Image (tube, rainbow, N blue to C red):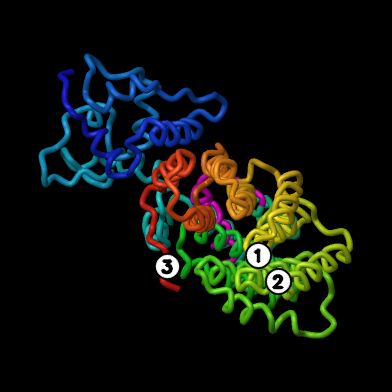
Amino acid sequence: MPQHPTLLKRLLLDRHWQTHHSFCREYVRAARYLHPDQTPVAPSRKQFGRWINGHLTRLPHPEHCQVLEAMFPRHSARRLFAPEPAPGVHTSSDAILESPPRREDQTTDRRDALRFGGTLTAGYLLDSLDSLHTEPARLHAALNTSTTTPDHIAALETTADDLGVRVIQANPPSTLIPEVLTEFRGVRMLLERRQRTADQVRLTRVAARLAIAMGNIVFDENDFPNAGRWYHAGQQAATEAGDQYLADMALGLLGYLPAYSGDPGAVLALIDPRLDQTKITPTPAVAFLWASKARAHATLGEKIAFRHAINRARRALDASPGHDSRYSAFTFPPGKLFFYQATGCARLGDVEGATEAADRALGLYDLTMTGDPALVRFDKATALAKAGELAEATQVASHALLDQYTYPGSSVLARAREFDALLGEPRTPAVRDWREILTTTVRPHARSAPNT
């Protein structure tokens, strides 16, 4: 092949992946999905330079080509290493630079878009994935025209619980959208046929769990309006099923939306009416609401109110009989309580309290989770920065973003920017290195922050 700037170089510039470090991060992420049983090896800096500048005599090794085609699903490896198109030609990964795609190419593009975490709208899923992913569930529902079996309901409950765990571990979470949507539709169709009362209640509870799981996914994709719709649906279904625990969990998750939109007052307005009720049975979900309230007070600088609320959260969790210590979309185990405590202490400038709580949270968390461990590290980094330890603070923050399990969803990026704003203007090498990492940590097709 002749020497020339390649289309690959232009696509990397478009996505801000042009540095060797940022390219390798995305390369390794794609390679893990292709070959989960292998340890990915990214190209060397020298190889990277040859790739983007066209210093090639033939295509790279087929395994490299497979990963690159996964990173840019609409482009073959040969096209990626071809000359950069002339100015004025659209070069994003959504462009078709040669002939229109064949039918089999479109199928591959759809599969890869799901697999590699492009932001997917509900409309796209409904139009493009309906037949492929939901017809089996529709057939099952059609066969159960009036009733379903206890074994079938038990299987649905097990699936919903499993998805609650997987949704906080999938990287990116959007890979689970087709599966969650398929299960949700199947349950909804069964509910529309009105089952026996006890079965209807169990199915409604399954629907609530699936709605909460979907809310978590679209929240991570920064789609706050749709996240709110799914969380509301989960809360409504839980209430109808008489499951106060799930209804409280959905309420706490609804609090994410104003919390990550910079409106702690709206969090309090949402949660306080429930906590002001009398004779509330202590559950982990109630602890979640108190912890959310504590974080909101800390954001407002209200130290006494924060201490009161975080202590109420701890008492509620301690008094919860046999609480679930697993990490899922439906639980609030002790590690999460320490996480919320670390956040509040960091925002109030309690360096020692934030560091201690963050370390205890990390000691309890499953570190393969894609969000919370990174958020805890940002709490610790924030506390260190407020203590003037910028080098250590940026090191901890960098670890949060670069960890192989971290998915840069809406909450992670919001906390990263919050930490960055705290650093101000110092141009130390540590701060410069951190800001390069932050700048290059951008998800493909990421939406702008919502105006809510």
Residue 292 point in image, percent of width and height: 67, 68
Q: Are marks 2 and 1 in contact (CB under 8 Å)?
A: yes
Q: Is residue 258 magenta?
A: no
Pointer 3 local density, CA inside 10 Å: few below 14, some 14–19, many at least 20: few
Q: Which residue is mark 1?
A: 348
Q: Is residue 399 left or right of residue 82?
A: right
Q: Which residues are magenta?
A: 165-189
Which mark is drawn over residue 450? 3
Residue 73 point in image, percent of width and height: 33, 39
Secondary structure found at label 3: loop
User: In the picture shown, does residue 264 fall above or below 372?
Assistant: below
Mark nearer the N terminus (2 vs 1): 2
Secondary structure found at label 2: helix
Give the image quarter of residue 281.
Answer: bottom right
Residue at (23, 38) in percent of width and height: 10
Give the image quarter of residue 38.
Answer: top right
Q: Is residue 170 visible?
A: no
Q: Which residue is mark 2?
A: 303
Mark nearer the N terminus (2 vs 3): 2
Between 3 and 398, the one lying in front of the other is 398
User: In the picture shown, does residue 406 fall above or below 382?
Assistant: above
Question: Which secondary structure is most common in the magenta stretch?
Answer: helix
Q: Gap between marks 1 and 3, in whole Å?
A: 26 Å
